[in-house]
């Protein structure tokens, strides 16, 4: 088994996950937002927008749809790279790099346990794909849009920039801004694990989870060795995406929600959880 | 399985409600800045009755235009407004940004993509004639609201048929977020802003934030 596990508990990615998230927040969120300045942007909106280009609006011509890809070409590159890397290695973008999800998880970890809301009872894929269906269909049918109106990639950077920039502060001086703030606070900052927003309402997370699920046979994933598992439930308690299930057969991981944060691997006393390729 | 299906249906329902509902206190306009006069992709539509509005305007500078551009909100009755521009908080010097001061962009150049946040505060108007009535002492309370009037004639017309005028003390009409080249005085972008009465239909293709 060890031969197939490319990264063990002492690996860089396991030991330094939060340091990587913090570095990503520094590089991608205000006040520095260094990466965006290279292309003349200040946040994910614009050239880097990872969410709008794949949203087809009613009466949109093919050329207009294509122009959206050109306008957000760095967002297109980002999403393509995220989906491809997930297919092969699992959702490392979500667990280690995404400054938006990472910021929500980091703030959640700083808050006392009594403040946390546990959303684990809600089947996340049902909410996620219900939301994604409307995200894609509403503009295509011309009945409305969730894109931009409810966007964590717009809200989190403005949240961090509001203390420094009146323009970022202005984002919250309107109903939609306040609702976005409420969603980020309740589903992110106050959620147990900090990943409620990612798990329910992130369209990139939804596409990424599909790539994770489709590639689970070929790619590297977090896996449970049932023969070693004692069903103690320690892994389930620390999973920020509540993707570990227990039933009469033992514990199992839902690859439609799992990201390789590998918190479960760290707490497993039986070494029943590993990250690697499917051995069967 | 049943639980998953029920949650999926609920998620679709809530998401549909969110997608189809429009928040009428803010809107987003996208346009181009051109030497020969740029246009917005569509007019901005807002609904009257809000204490303040937020207009988010983004534009791309089309070559060969270069210059300084003054931004003003035009229309009657005049609205109080503040304009803020997005820019880097810590400028690392990796890109040359146009400076935004006193509602003016300095040094706009081709391919720049300025973004503006325009906070607008509509004045209270006379429900009969539509004139601004900021400090008018002619006041009538009707239906739990305070109405102010520009003249005694308007006040009397209101009292005779208050039902027809109720709720019409909020600004409605057409405004323009206008961008002017400071050297030539020529318009380089016009964004129409329409404030409609409650219940009036919006135009197709509007993009609301």
Image: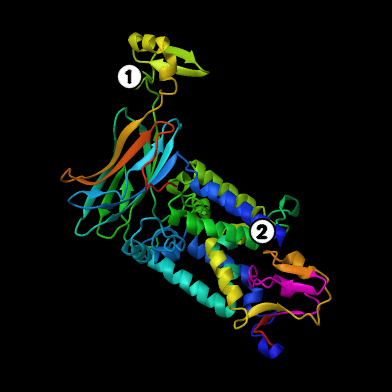
**Which label sits in the foreground, 1 or 2?**
2
Q: Residues within 10 Å of mark 2 (few under 14, many from 20)?
A: some
Mark 1 or mark 2: which comes first in sequence?
Answer: 2
Front residue (pair B46, B185): B46
In the image, residue B132 sits, relative to residue A165, either above or below, namely: above
What segment carries the magenta color?
Answer: A247-274
Residue B199 left/right relative to A25: left
Which residue lies most toward the left here? B184
Magenta span includes B195: no
Q: Position of residue B57 (x, y in %)?
A: 36, 48
Front residue (pair A94, B182): A94
Dot 1: chain letter: B
Magenta span includes A253: yes
Tell me which residue sits at (73%, 69%) in the image: A244
In the image, residue A199 sits, relative to residue A14, either above or below, namely: above
Q: Which residue is mark 2?
A: B5
Q: Residues within 10 Å of mark 1 (few under 14, many from 20)?
A: some
Q: Which residue is mark 1?
A: B129
Residues at circles 1 and 2 in contact by the CB criterion of under 8 Å: no
């Amino acid at each position: 088994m060890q031969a197939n596990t490319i990264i063990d508990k002492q690996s860089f990615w396991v030991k330094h996950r939060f340091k990587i998230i913090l570095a990503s927040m520094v590089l991608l969120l205000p006040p520095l937002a260094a990466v965006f300045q290279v292309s003349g942007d200040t946040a994910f909106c614009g050239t880097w927008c990872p969410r709008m280009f794949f949203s087809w609006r009613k009466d949109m011509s093919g050329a207009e749809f294509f122009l959206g890809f050109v306008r957000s070409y760095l967002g297109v590159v980002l999403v393509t790279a995220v989906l491809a890397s997930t297919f092969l290695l699992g959702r490392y973008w979500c667990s280690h790099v995404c400054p938006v999800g990472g910021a929500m998880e980091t703030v959640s970890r700083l808050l006392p346990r009594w403040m946390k809301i546990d959303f684990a009872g809600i089947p996340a894929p049902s909410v996620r794909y219900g939301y994604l269906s409307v995200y894609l269909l509403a503009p295509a049918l011309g009945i409305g849009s969730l894109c931009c109106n409810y966007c964590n990639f717009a809200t989190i950077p403005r949240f961090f920039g509001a203390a420094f920039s009146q323009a970022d502060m202005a984002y919250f001086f309107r109903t939609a801004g306040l609702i976005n703030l409420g969603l980020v606070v309740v589903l992110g900052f106050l959620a147990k694990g900090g990943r409620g927003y990612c798990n329910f309402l992130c369209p990139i997370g939804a596409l990424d989870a599909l790539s994770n699920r489709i590639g689970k046979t070929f790619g590297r994933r977090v896996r449970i060795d049932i023969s070693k598992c004692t069903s103690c439930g320690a892994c389930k308690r620390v999973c920020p995406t509540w993707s570990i299930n227990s039933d009469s057969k033992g514990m199992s991981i839902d690859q439609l929600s799992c990201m390789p944060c590998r918190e479960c691997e760290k707490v497993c006393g039986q070494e029943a959880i590993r990250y690697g390729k499917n051995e069967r | 399985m049943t639980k998953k299906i029920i949650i999926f249906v609920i998620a679709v329902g809530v998401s549909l409600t969110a997608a189809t509902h429009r928040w009428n206190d803010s809107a987003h306009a996208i346009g181009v800045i051109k030497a020969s006069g740029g246009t917005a992709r569509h007019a901005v539509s807002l609904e009257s009755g809000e204490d303040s509005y937020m207009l988010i305007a983004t534009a791309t500078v089309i070559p060969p235009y270069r210059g300084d551009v003054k931004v003003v909100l035009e229309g009657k009755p005049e609205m109080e407004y503040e304009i803020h521009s997005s820019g880097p908080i810590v400028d690392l010097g990796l890109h040359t940004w146009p400076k935004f001061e006193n509602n003016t962009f300095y040094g706009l150049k081709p391919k720049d993509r300025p973004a503006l946040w325009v906070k607008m505060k509509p004045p209270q108007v006379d429900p009969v004639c539509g004139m601004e009535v900021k400090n008018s002492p002619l006041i009538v309370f009707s239906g739990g609201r305070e109405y102010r009037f520009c003249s005694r004639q308007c006040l009397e017309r209101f009292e005779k048929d208050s039902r027809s005028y109720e709720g019409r003390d909020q600004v409605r009409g057409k405004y323009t977020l206008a961008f002017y080249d400071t050297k030539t005085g020529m318009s380089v972008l016009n964004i129409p802003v329409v404030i409609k009465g409650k219940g009036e239909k919006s135009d197709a293709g509007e993009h609301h934030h």
